[in-house]
Image (cartoon, rainbow, N blue to C red):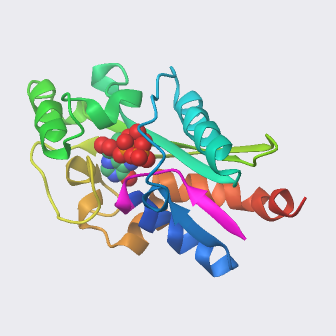
Amino acid sequence: DQLIIATRNSSKAREFREMFEPKGITIKTLADFPEIGEINENGTSFEENATIKAETISHQTNLPVLADDSGLEVVALDGAPGIHSARYAGDHDDAANNRKLLANLADVPAEKRQAAFHTTLVLLKPNGDKLVADGDVQGTILTAPRGNNGFGYDPLFWLADQGKSMAELTDAEKNAISHRGRALRNMMTRFDDWWEV
Ligand code: ITT
């Protein structure tokens, strides 16, 4: 059995691989399909964007596809960067995105820096059968980066319960509490029945 993970983000791909390979499913990523070009994620929600990615790739490969659309929602910024998280500062540049986030929150005090990571997963078969799952994790935005693991906004995302930033967690620790881990476990409760039919 094969499943394409619809991502060019190698950190995301690694987080997913750890969940599916134990089921005997062969994971492919977009790195295995260089002919698939840039996908225009022009939807207005996480689910729409994940569905656009999954449909485009499933049509081109005739294989089942799992697409993830995720992002950071900051309360004091009315939910920004949200679906624009990857290109918040223009290009897809994590360091520039983090600098812009810190600058936009410069005057926001500690008690008003609540944020959440969100993931919507869309799993799509070539016949159009679709499975959707969501996951969130709550935290606050630091005033300076901490930690070197993870990716994206992880160094700025503080987890009070852990006493660590998301970038100070190992992959396994992050999977256990993250938006993506939660969405994936939510999906997995329905996956086996869905996959067999
Ligand atoms: P693909 O579309 O190829 O999967 P991407 O990185 O562009 O890769 P998204 O469109 O879902 O993925 O954008 C998500 C952005 O949100 C990502 O670039 C990060 O900046 C941020 N993000 C998502 N999940 C994150 C996580 O677990 N930790 C830190 N930042 C995250």
Reply yes or no: does residue 53 show up in magenta. Answer: no
> With respect to residue 146, does 85 lie above or below?
above
Q: Does 103 sit left or right of 127 as displayed?
A: left
Residue 138 seen from this side:
no
Identify which residue is drawn at 42% across, 59% down. Answer: 31
Q: 164 or 17: which is nearer to us? A: 17
Q: Nearer the viewer, residue 108 or 189?
A: 189
> From what the image shows, is residue 84 above or below residue 66?
above
Q: Could you say where residue 69 lies in the image, as x and y percent from the top left?
A: 49, 40
Where is residue 49 shown, x and y percent of the image? Answer: 53, 31
Q: Is residue 137 visible?
A: yes
Q: Is residue 197 above or below residue 122?
A: below
Q: Residue furthest right?
A: 197
Q: Indicate the quadrant of ligand 1 in the picture.
A: top left
What is the span of residues highlighted in magenta in the rendered image?
Answer: 1-11
Place of residue 59 in the rendered image (x, y in percent of width and height, measured from the top left): 67, 41
Q: Residue at 52% across / 59% down in the picture?
A: 181
For the C terminus, give its image quadrant. bottom right
Quadrant including the N terminus: bottom right
Q: Is residue 62 left or right of residue 66?
A: right
> Is residue 24 or residue 182 the one in the foreground?
24
Residue 10, located in which quarter of the rendered image? bottom left
> Which residue shows up at 48% across the image and 45% down it?
36
Give the percent coordinates (x, y) of residue 171: 37, 71
